[in-house]
Amino acid sequence: MTFSELIKERFSVRSYQDRPVEPEKISAILEAARVAPTAHNNQPQRIYIAQSREAREKLAAICKCTFSAPVIFVVCYDSEAAWHNRLMPGYQSGETDAAISCTHMMLQAWDLGIASCWVGMFNSDQVIEALGLPKNLTVSALLPAGYAAEDAAPIPMHEASRDSSELFFTL
Ligand SMILES: Cc1cc2nc3c(=O)[nH]c(=O)nc-3n(C[C@H](O)[C@H](O)[C@H](O)COP(=O)(O)O)c2cc1C
């Protein structure tokens, strides 16, 4: 599969098999997050791997979108470690850096036959509290991942890409 094929084929999976994800695949997905570009190369991303039943149940109790996945990556950032743009007071790159890491993970996972779904519908403070994560972190995304259920299929939103004329503008 070429990269162009991968990014078109991938879709958000919301139904998973019980089958665990092999440790080497978890490692490869994390490696994709490790090498992701970050502002000023500050690397403020901090990623937790929820695989135990206990951790996944804690997340499921506060987020409707964990989909009983066998692994949930909790993609966080440390805003103090992030790059602070002195030309734009108040801006720091943590959210962007974490999002790039999460994108790398999602695409690397698909290349290894591991499906995922980017999840934003949670409260960061609740996740930090439930999992006992350091309070200086912000949770940017949850990424439930695993082998897709046999009947997993893209929902209609997957195909609903805007026309290029609405997105791209020549200057
Ligand atoms: C920032 C972000 C937040 C998202 N939050 C959720 C979510 O909370 N629950 C969910 O089921 N899907 C969520 N999604 C998945 C999107 O709905 C999905 O990517 C979009 O509809 C396009 O479909 P596709 O991924 O199948 O191509 C999120 C995606 C992104 C990028």
Image (cartoon, grey):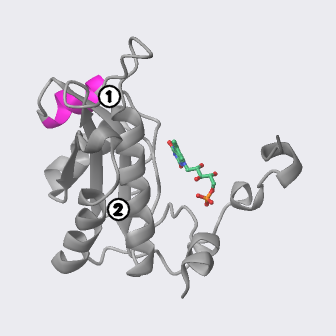
Measured from the top left, where is residue 3 in percent x and y? 54, 78
Q: Residues within 10 Å of mark 2 (few under 14, many from 20)?
A: many
Up/down of 31 relative to 171, above or below: below
Q: Is 76 placed left or right of 88 in the picture?
A: left
Q: Is 64 placed left or right of 167 in the picture?
A: left
Whether residue 128 appears in magenta in the rendering, the answer is: yes
Element type where label 2 sits in the image:
loop
Q: Nearer the viewer, residue 95 or 23?
A: 95
Which residue is tagged 2?
69
> From the Cβ of disc 2, is ligand 1 less than 8 Å away?
no
Q: Which mark is residue 124?
A: 1
- Looking at the rendered image, the quarter that the N terminus falls into is bottom right
Instruction: Give the mark toward the camera: 1 or 2.
Output: 1
Q: Residues within 10 Å of mark 1 (few under 14, many from 20)?
A: some
Residue plotted at (23% across, 44% down):
43
Specify the segment rendered in magenta. 125-131
Element type where label 1 sits in the image:
helix
| Helix, strand or loop: magenta stretch | helix
CA gap between label 1 and label 2 equals 19 Å
Residue plotted at (34% across, 40% down):
39
- Place residue 93 in its image quadrant: top left
Q: Examine the rendering and report whether any part of residue 117 can be seen.
A: yes
Give the residue type at disc 1. Ser
Up/down of 83 relative to 48, above or below: above
